Structure formats: C-alpha cells, structure tokens
Amino acid sequence: MKPSIFLAGLFHETNTFVEQPTSINSFQITRGKDVFGFLGNASPMDGFLDSARQYGWNVVPGVDYRASPSGMASDEVFDTFWREMRGHLEPALANGLDAIFLVLHGAMVTETHADLEGELLARIRHLPGAGELPLFAVLDLHANVSARMARHASALITYHKNPHTDARETAVRAARHLRQVLASGRPLRTHYLHSRILLAPPSTGTADSPMRELEAMARTLEKSAGCWEVGIASGFAHADTPDTGLSFWVVSDQPEIICRDALNSLSQAARLHAQELRPQEWELPAALDCIAEEKKFPALLVEPADNIGGGGPGDATFILRALLERSFARCGVILNDPAAVQLLCQLSAGQTKQILLGGKGSRFDPGPVEMEVMIERLTDGRFELEDKQSHLAALAGNQISMGPCAVVTHRHLTILITSRATAPLDLGQWRSQGVDPAELEIIGIKAAVAHRCAYDPIAASSFTVRTPGPCTSNLHSLPYRKLQRPIYPLDM
C-alpha cells in the first residue's frame, strides 16, 4: 500500500523593523490539487513532489501560503492559513496518514506569534492522529529556530548554502530521510541548541567565515557521530523574537548524549569564529572614489540596509543620489516604486516625465528624488530565471513577476522601476527588460549575500556600502525588545 504523505507550506521571512505590515493580500495562496502545479518549478515544493513521484507516495495536498520578505505579518494570515490547512489535514488524518511534510521558512512573525513555526508544529501535534506521525519540515538557512520547533518536529532539514542554490535539493534530501524513516519505522528526534550569537546578514554567506567553517564541521559530524542531519540556521537578525540568532540541531535516532556532544562542539567553534567577525562596509563616497580611481567595471555597490531579500522596501535613494552627483559613463539601479510605474504607464516609450522617484518606504530615507526621466520601455515585469538554482527559486520557483515595470534613463543612469519588490538575485531581471548588466559601469544592488551567484561572474569589483535602513548591519542600532539576552555581539 502506498504511503500517504500530507504536504503544506507557509513561507515568509518577517522583518519586524520594517514599518509597513504584511497583509494576507501580499500572499500567494495555492490550495488543494493546485499544489501539484509546483512540480517542475525548481522550488523546494518541486523537490518534494518529484521525490514523492519517484518513491510512489500518495501525496495529500493541503495549502501553501508564501510572500516575499517584508514587515510584520498580520494575525489574519496565520489564522486563515491554519483554518484552511486544518480543513485539509483533519480529514486526511481520519483517513490514515503515514507522515506530514511541510515547507516553511522558519523566521515568520505575526502580531501575536513571535515563534509562528513553533506554534504551527505544536498545533499539528495536538490534532487527533498526528501525535506520533513523522513530522518533517524544510527550513530556510535564515530560520530563527526555537526549542519548541525542535521539540515538535521529527526532523528539521535546512538549506546548506547561502546564496540558497540548494533549496530544491534540500527538500529532496528531506524526502530521502523520510523514506528511510518509513522503511525502518525508527522514530527520529531533533536535539537543539541556541548559540547565543547574532549574525548580521552579510556575515551569513556560506562561502565566508563563520558559516563556511561551521557547515564543514556539521557535515563531518554527520559522518562521525552517525547523525541523520546536523542542522545550522544562521538566523535572521532583523526579526525581534526571543529565538533570533544562530542555532544548531541534530536529527538522529542515537542517544541524546552523542547528539549533545556534537551540538556543544559546534557552539564552541561558533564562539571562536564570531569573535573574529569584523563586518567591512564602505562609506558610499569613499567607495565611489575608489571605483573612479581603479576603473574596474562593472563595479557593484551592494546596499545591505535596503536588502529586498531581507524585507527592505527596495526604494532607498542613497545610491541613486550619489550616482547623480558623479560622472560615470553608464550606471544602473533597480528601485521599487509602484506609484512611479503607474504614472509612467500612462505614457509611451520615448516620452519624458518629471517624477518623484523612490524614498517612500522607510523612515530612514531622505525621501523621493525629483528627476526628469525618459521612458525606454514599459513591460509586464515577468521573467524566467536564467539560473534555475537561483536563490530566488526557493521563494517563487523559476517564473518571476516584478509587476508592471518601466525602464527609464536620466543622463548616465539607467533605472529599472518595478511595482513589486524583487530581490536582485538573477541577471534575467535586467536582461528581460532589455538591459545587459555586463555593459554597466556601476550597478546598485539591494542585497546582502544572495546576489553573489548572479553578479560575481560579471563583476570586476564589489563594494558593500553602509547606509541607514531597516536591514542595517549595525545590530546595535536596532531597538530589540523581545530578543533573549545576553547575546553576542550586543552583550560582549
């Protein structure tokens, strides 16, 4: 008889320092059999569905809610999700299920629930028939994992890479583990430890210290300690919750003492490496001076404080203003400004218009820039990922919509204006709009780490710049209230 596996998803990275709340209207909702439409789109859902097809499983689809990173989610989002998911899950439990598989982010927050994924897993466990079932959850590397999540999940399986080029692969790995559990009948437990370390997003890349060393150590421990999975979540520092920060866990059927030894080893290593962290960010004028002197083009101006992938509004004007004052040959920036696009869409290519651009989404910004622009082209903003393993595929699959877009020019500046904040993680974002980023001298990028897979191959130089914003790397400047203290580096 085919094993029956229930499948659902809830995916949102919540930046609690962004002023604008996130309503249910921001979520893409997929229900029932429509969930099978994720098959082939390069997302974690695709990874699980493809594995289930190979293993001959009967997949019972529930509901999937997902939204781009943004501000605090409303309670309505979770209340509605739970009501819908429960409506699918309870009948499935009554008919007989062999396991439950969830695709989550791990750093979602609502007005009431600081540990939303922990609340979700606990509610599932309390449903009749779900108490002893294998309960697997795939998580983003930036999850803020809690003891409650670990207590109620049989297995938490997280991405190993940032940029997240292995999101689909992670779901495939989780499905493989689940297959072993179903075949053996051996129960798994998730053993958890918080490091008491807070990492700014630019410090969470897995090609850099400390994540590079910790990931290598985790893979070694998996082999030496006989663990099914040694998980590391770098955490999402822009969510103010008690569990925010770097955490570790072990998924195993081994005695707890073996798992604790592995966790303690990781924690000790993390403390040593964290003390060596010295985030390096340039002042914007100094970065531009260096670019002008070295003339290594294209040069990237990376702005973590307005990181769209971390919930930033994507319309900060600091780089725009700085480039307007310089005389480079051709520069490019992407700004999210639906109001400006709506105004420009009433015109045609070749026309000019005086507009107020950007500076509307954050109290840190000096405000919109008034400028006359020429319309090069107007589009629907849809594009297909050039890299099907792009970080962006973890969220939205390989078909991306930026909403209606306008490509405009102002002197030496080419500006792509979007209607939907879209993280700059794939060069198809530019090329689909008729712009070759490799021909630009300077490119403004609203990201922290995840842009690297796309942009590093074409970049001759890169400068991470310090600006004000809701995704600032200066964690000391953030008004944490719920974060459990002490924690490094806020408390030395």
Image (cartoon, grey):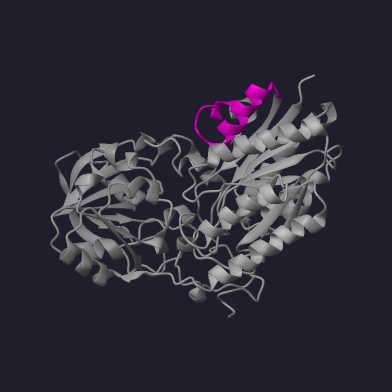
**Residue 220 magenta-highlighted:** no
Residue 279 as seen in the image, left or right of residue 10: left
Per the rendered image, the range of residues in magenta is 36-57
Q: Which residue is drawn at 42% across and 37% down?
A: 400
- From the viewer's perspective, is residue 485 above or below residue 401? below
Residue 98 appears in the picture as rendered? no
Q: In which quarter of the image is the N terminus?
A: top right
Query: Residue most toward the top?
Result: 1
For the point 37% across and 56% down, the residue is 446
Q: In which quarter of the image is residue 168?
A: top right
Q: Position of residue 488 (x, y in %)?
A: 58, 74
In the rendered image, residue 45 lying in the magenta stretch gets the answer: yes
Q: Position of residue 89 (x, y in %)?
A: 76, 34
* Residue drawn at 81 percent across, 45 percent down: 125
Vertical order, 54 against 250 (above or below)? above
Position of the C terminus by quadrant: bottom right
Relative to the observer, which residue lies in front, 352 or 208? 208
| Closer to the camera in the image, 257 or 446 | 257
